[in-house]
Every structure is written in structure tokens, then in C-alpha cells.
């Protein structure tokens, strides 16, 4: 079945806005912080946003299954047969939410045959939405008053900007960044929370985001769609595109996201590649 990605995108915007409204209500109140089985934090904002998204997607596309971080996860034996599904992180960056630094996002992606084809990333506090329609090579940034196309930028070694996580930077990555800095003409390192990092790459505001450490598939899918639609790329360390729903675990391998997908990154930054 051919998908009308523009129609789907238009229908996703109010769903993201509803989830964002639920998040902001909790953000501006006193709330409880709980721990999940993996010791990661969760709040009412995560669960209320999840409920809003599940309700919206059920109305929009009742025939497309949904895989969400905050819902029970179907076994691989079931989802291996999914040619198309929604992949959702209702609140990416819960630690940033708790720290109140505004760098948390709502993420909804459409995955088809293991690749992301449509992604929407909402920033609840800023009232900004990034969207990527991969087959159409179209990436968009929307605010309350404006909508503009965005494009990833060409790499200039003399003004390189590298993004890192605010909350998860291990020693291996610190060492790799130091080696990359030594080999670069100029390098600015910026810590940024959540999938916003991938959107900044897509918007041409940074050049590279290496991730050496665990992430889950719902952490990257929507942002990857925005980035790919803008002309960037997200690769595993062997230089292959990051794919989804390929095994029992929902964990990503280490990866490197870049704004300029045509640049010879393996030669310029071999420390980030195998």
C-alpha cells in the first residue's frame, strides 16, 4: 500500500501537540519521579503523553501497530512480521525533564521494512516541531507562527561542531572526542539533550554526533527520519544505515550521526568508525 506521507504528517501534528500539552502540564506542577525496571526515571508526563499518542494513532491508523517505550512490548516473534509500524518515545530525555532544562522531546516515527520513512520530533516547552518525510527528501521546522524547510549543512573542518549527550558521556567517548579534536582544525563540543541533537544536525547547526553507548530504537527513529530527510545520515560504526526491528533486542549499536552525508567521515574521523 502506498503511503501519503504528507497527509500522515498533517495528522500527526495535533497528536504531538496533545502529547506536548500533557507533558507541559506536569512540567509546571509538582510531580512524582519513579524508577522503571532498568532504573531509568519515569514520571506522569511520560505516561500521559503515551496515552495521548496511542489514542491519536489508533484513530489515525488502526491497522498500523504501535511500539512505544511506555507500553508493553510485543515479542519479536510477533513484530518480526510487521512490515510497517509506529515507533514512539512519548518523552525522550526524561532526565532533562527532571533537570528542567527544556531539552526533552516527543518522538513518533513510521518504520517500513526496517527503515524510517517519516518522523516527527516535538519540543513541548519551545512549541517547535521538526518533521522529516524521507521518501520526499523534505525536512521541516514548524513553530506556532512559521514553517520552513531545513537542510543539513556541508562540513567545514574549520568550524566543526560536535554534539554529545548531556547525561551519558562515557570514558570511551571522551577519549575518542579528544583524539578527534587533536586531528581537527577547530572543534566545538556542545552537550545537548534528547533527540534534539539529531534535529540540530538536520537544521545545519552542527556537524557530527557520535554515540558510543546504549540507546534504544525509540530514542533515534524520529530524529533519524528528520536527519535523513534533510540530507544527513545516521550510520552504525561500520558505515551502514541504522535499521530497526531486526532482532529480539530493541537496543541500537553504537552509531555516528552526521549532517554532511557526502563527506569522507571515515577518513576524517576514523576514531568513530570501526
Image: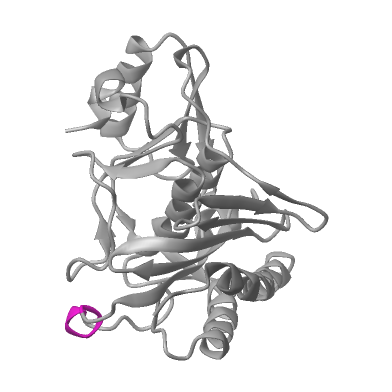
- Residue at the farthest front position: 2
Find the magenta span and give its range: 76-80
Report the number of discs: 0
Which one is nearer the viewer's eye here, 247 or 156?
156
Measured from the top left, where is residue 123 in percent x and y?
64, 57
Question: What residue appears at the point 58 percent right and 33 percent down from the top-left corner?
Answer: 205
Whether residue 87 is situated above or below residue 211 in the rendered picture: below
- Residue at the farthest right position: 145
Whether residue 245 is situated above or below residue 130 in the rendered picture: below
The answer to whether residue 267 of the structure is visible from this angle is yes
On screen, residue 230 versus residue 174, left or right, reads: right
- Where is the C terminus found, in terms of image quarters? top left
On screen, residue 48 versus residue 207, left or right, reads: right
Residue 110, image quadrant: bottom left
- Where is the N terminus found, in terms of image quarters? bottom left
Question: What residue appears at the point 31 percent right and 32 percent down from the top-left corner?
Answer: 173
Residue 15, image quadrant: bottom right
Measured from the top left, where is residue 177 in percent x and y?
35, 24
Measured from the top left, where is residue 13 in percent x and y?
65, 70
Which one is nearer the viewer's eye here, 75 or 229?
229
In the image, residue 10 lies in the stretch drawn in magenta? no
On screen, residue 251 versus residue 166, left or right, reads: left
Which one is nearer the viewer's eye here, 157 or 8?
8
Question: What residue appears at the point 27 percent right and 58 percent down from the top-left corner?
Answer: 243
Question: What residue appears at the point 38 percent right and 76 percent down from the top-left corner?
Answer: 85
Whether residue 263 is situated above or below residue 225 in the rendered picture: above
Measured from the top left, where is residue 51 in percent x and y?
55, 83
Majority secondary structure of magenta residues: helix
In the image, residue 79 lies in the stretch drawn in magenta? yes
The answer to whether residue 68 of the structure is visible from this angle is no
On screen, residue 91 versus residue 112, left or right, reads: right
Amino acid at each position: 500500500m502506498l503511503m501519503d506521507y504528507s497527509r500522515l504528517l498533517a495528522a500527526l501534528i495535533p497528536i504531538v501537540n496533545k502529547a506536548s500539552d500533557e507533558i507541559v502540564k506536569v512540567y509546571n506542577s509538582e510531580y512524582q519521579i519513579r524508577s522503571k525496571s532498568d532504573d531509568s526515571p519515569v514520571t506522569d508526563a511520560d505516561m500521559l503523553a503515551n496515552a495521548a499518542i496511542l489514542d491519536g494513532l489508533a484513530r489515525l491508523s488502526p491497522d498500523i501497530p504501535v511500539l512505544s517505550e511506555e507500553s508493553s512490548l510485543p515479542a519479536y516473534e510477533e513484530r518480526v512480521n510487521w512490515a510497517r509500524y509506529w515507533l514512539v518515545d512519548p518523552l525522550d530525555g526524561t532526565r532533562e525533564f527532571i533537570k528542567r532544562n527544556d531539552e526533552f522531546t516527543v518522538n513518533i516515527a513510521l518504520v517500513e521494512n526496517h527503515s524510517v520513512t517519516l518522523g516527527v520530533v516535538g519540543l513541548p516547552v519551545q512549541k517547535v516541531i521538526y518533521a522529516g518525510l524521507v521518501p520526499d527528501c523534505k525536512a521541516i521546522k514548524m513553530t506556532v507562527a512559521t514553517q520552513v524547510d531545513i537542510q543539513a549543512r556541508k562540513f567545514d573542518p574549520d568550524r566543526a561542531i560536535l554534539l554529545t549527550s548531556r547525561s551519558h558521556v562515557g570514558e570511551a567517548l571522551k577519549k575518542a572526542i579528544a583524539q578527534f579534536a587533536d586531528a581537527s582544525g577547530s572543534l566545538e563540543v556542545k552537550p545537548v539533550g534528547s533527540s534534539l541533537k539529531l534535529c540540530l544536525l538536520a537544521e545545519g547547526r552542527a556537524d557530527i554526533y557520535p554515540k558510543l553507548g546504549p540507546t534504544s530504537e525509540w530514542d533515534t527513529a524520529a530524529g533519524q527520519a528528520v536527519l535523513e530527510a534533510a540530507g544527513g545520515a545516521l550510520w552504525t560504526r561500520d558505515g551502514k544505515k541504522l535499521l530497526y526491528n531486526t532482532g529480539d533486542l530493541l537496543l541500537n549499536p553504537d552509531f555516528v550521526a552526521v549532517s554532511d552525508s557526502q563527506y569522507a567521515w571515515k577518513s576524517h574521523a576514523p576514531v568513530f568508525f570501526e
